[in-house]
Amino acid sequence: MNVYELGNQDSWVLSEIAWLNNKLGYYKKALECLEQLQETQSIDDWMRLEMAVAHNGLGAYDQALALMEEIKEDKLTGLGIEKAYALSRLERFDEALELYLKENQDSVFINTEIAYIYSRQDRYDLEEPFIRRAYEGGRQDAWVLSEYAKVMSYEHHDYEKAISLLK
């Protein structure tokens, strides 16, 4: 027997499809799988987190937070990051920072998110080490480059460095 013979009603198959859809950024499809799964079994912490990931991806941050507040296992992998992401998008920056600062500071994503929060608060002095780590960690897209240039010009008045980052 293979996975296809089990059909789309199998709870393990549905949960894996949901997880993979979230990883691919297909948040609506992930939610559909999880909702279908919810019809046949009670929702657990893992399902709540996957539903929250999907809601975050769709921009439904309040819904994501509500689901995460129901999670009993506070050590669930990814919970702190997802919660911080939703909080930051809802401009609850202090709460988001508290969670992000507990995460791995070697992560380009975490450094980018912390830089985002400080940027939104016009705290370029605090943003600088995080945006620099994101840049040095390999994220050199338009947002990071423009933020790094902003820090160089506002904090250090190093306009040449700012220009070089944007060229």
Image: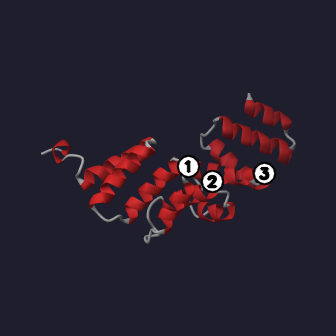
Q: Verify CB contact (< 8 Å) between mark 1 and mark 2.
A: yes
| Residue at position x 43%, y 70% in the image | 73
Instruction: Determine the image quadrant of residue 62.
Output: bottom right
Which circle's residue, 2 or 3, is located before the other in the chain? 2
Q: Which mark is residue 83?
A: none
The label nearer to you, 1 versus 2, is 1
Which circle's residue, 3 or 1, is located before the other in the chain? 1
Type of amino acid at the residue the image marks with label 2: Arg
Which circle's residue, 1 or 2, is located before the other in the chain? 1
- The C terminus lies in quadrant: top right
Type of amino acid at the residue the image marks with label 3: Tyr
Residue behind mark 2? 89
- Tell me the crowding category of disc 1: few under 14, some 14 to 19, or many 20 or more residues within 10 angstroms, Cα based: some
> Residue 40 location in percent, x, y?
27, 59
Comparing 15 with 102, the one in front is 15
- The N terminus lies in quadrant: top left
| Residue at position x 31%, y 55% in the image | 37
Say left or right for 5 vs 37: left
Residue behind mark 1? 59
Say left or right for 12 vs 115: left
Comparing 40 with 140, the one in front is 40
Q: How is the image coloured?
A: secondary structure
The label nearer to you, 3 versus 1, is 1
Residue behind mark 3? 124
Secondary structure beneath label 1:
loop
Secondary structure beneath label 3:
helix
> Residue 102 location in percent, x, y?
58, 64
Q: CA distance from mark 1 to mark 2?
A: 8 Å
Q: Is residue 104 visible?
A: no
Q: Is residue 67 visible?
A: yes
Secondary structure beneath label 2:
helix
Q: CA distance from mark 3 to mark 1?
A: 26 Å
